[in-house]
Amino acid sequence: MSVIKLSYESDVLLSDSDLSILIDDNDITYKINKKEILFDWSEEFGIHFLKILNKSQGLFKLLDIQIDNDSIRHLLYLAYLEKDKRKRDSTWVKKENGALTIPFGHPLSWWYSKCSTLIDNGCIGDNLYSKFEVYYPKSVSIPTHTYSKFLQGFFKYDFDFTVVPIKDFETPLHSKTVPYVKANLQYDQNKLFNEFDSKQDTLFNGNYSPSQSKYNAHWKLSMCVPMSEENKSSLTGWKSSYIYQPEEFPYLYQLLEQISAFGDVYIYHVFVGSVAPGTTVDPHKDDLSKIYAGKGYDVAGLCQIFIPVVWKPGNYYKFGSVGLIDYDQGAIVSNNHEYVHASINESDAVRYTIGIYCKFTGNNILNDRNSRD
């Protein structure tokens, strides 16, 4: 058990009913006086989140955090407020600001070393979040009765986080640092779901077995468009490689035509994946950039269009050192080559995913969106 002490200032006198304090979204019982807040914490390895909500009419300013009398020093300035999913540097909070969030790690010696490795000292406390996109993964506990300890550990523990310069998002496609961005792609999930669900025998008849199949045997995949020289040289080359007839999966075919119509996307490889309730895609990295390194295929970095098709609540998709991916945002372009990723389906329904490896010669898939949204 550790003792955490928060030093603070406020322009009003605060009582224990004026603040809500949480660690990892669990309410904390604390004692407060005019300068300090004290509470106990059952320490656990990894990255954690201290949140302070100010319910008073005054200004709360956090001055220091000590854990067992050890100050986190300047790492206090990793603190942020969040609005519209954007972080803003702050060590103070008003009622209308929502939660002041302070990421911290245990043990502190590791946390200090990790932060010093990823972020230059001069950046902390100097508009950090206007210069970098920082991904702090959150711990997720998945059911122990269903999933392996290996997978439980992948979702629960993180000993790293990810820092990406904002400038890398200006031209993110094929970036080796950007984990994912939103894609400008409209599609009817229900029509695709019904199309796949009614033709599972056709999709998963053994035409493709992934290299991960030895440890991801429960993950069904259908190679719809295999790699070919024509795919590399023609925007519509994929049509010759498409292993099904257009009328067999018309909505999938129309979606690929929609992507081709952007005029700057070379579709190299397309698969449809299926994950049944209670099953998983175990942690792995894709290695197409290495497999096809000598064939001139540019499939490295941020180059997979990842399209969730009717993922119900209870599905979790995580990038190691980044965190959970919000599948409700629709299609993304993801960096499956540089980041280890895994998922589970804890819902009551099968879920489908379309994966499309591409070479991008322009940014039409982003359509001038702010790609950090």
Image (tube, rainbow, N blue to C red):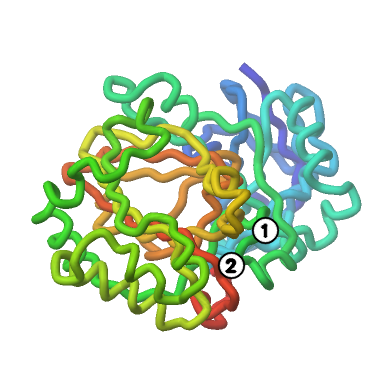
Q: Which mark is residue 372?
A: 2
The disc labelled 2 sits on which kind of residue? Arg
User: For the residue carrying disc 1, how many other residues have a C-alpha within 10 Å: few (<14), some (14-19), or many (20+)?
Assistant: many
Is mark 1 in CB contact (under 8 Å) with mark 2?
Answer: yes
Q: Going 40% across and 76% down the picture, which residue do you hit? A: 236
For the image shown, how many numbered marks are present on the structure? 2
Q: Nearer the viewer, residue 27 or 172?
A: 172
Q: Quadrant of the C terminus?
A: bottom right
Left or right: 170, with 334 as reference point: right
Q: Which labelled disc corresponds to residue 133?
A: 1
- As drawn, is 20 to the left or to the right of 313? right
Dot 2: element: loop
- 212 with respect to 288 (left or right): left
Outermost residue on the top side: it is 1
Marks 1/2: CA–CA distance: 8 Å
- Of 305 and 265, nearer the camera is 265
Tell me residue 231's x, y (percent): 45, 66
At 13% from the left and 61% from the top, the residue drawn is 194
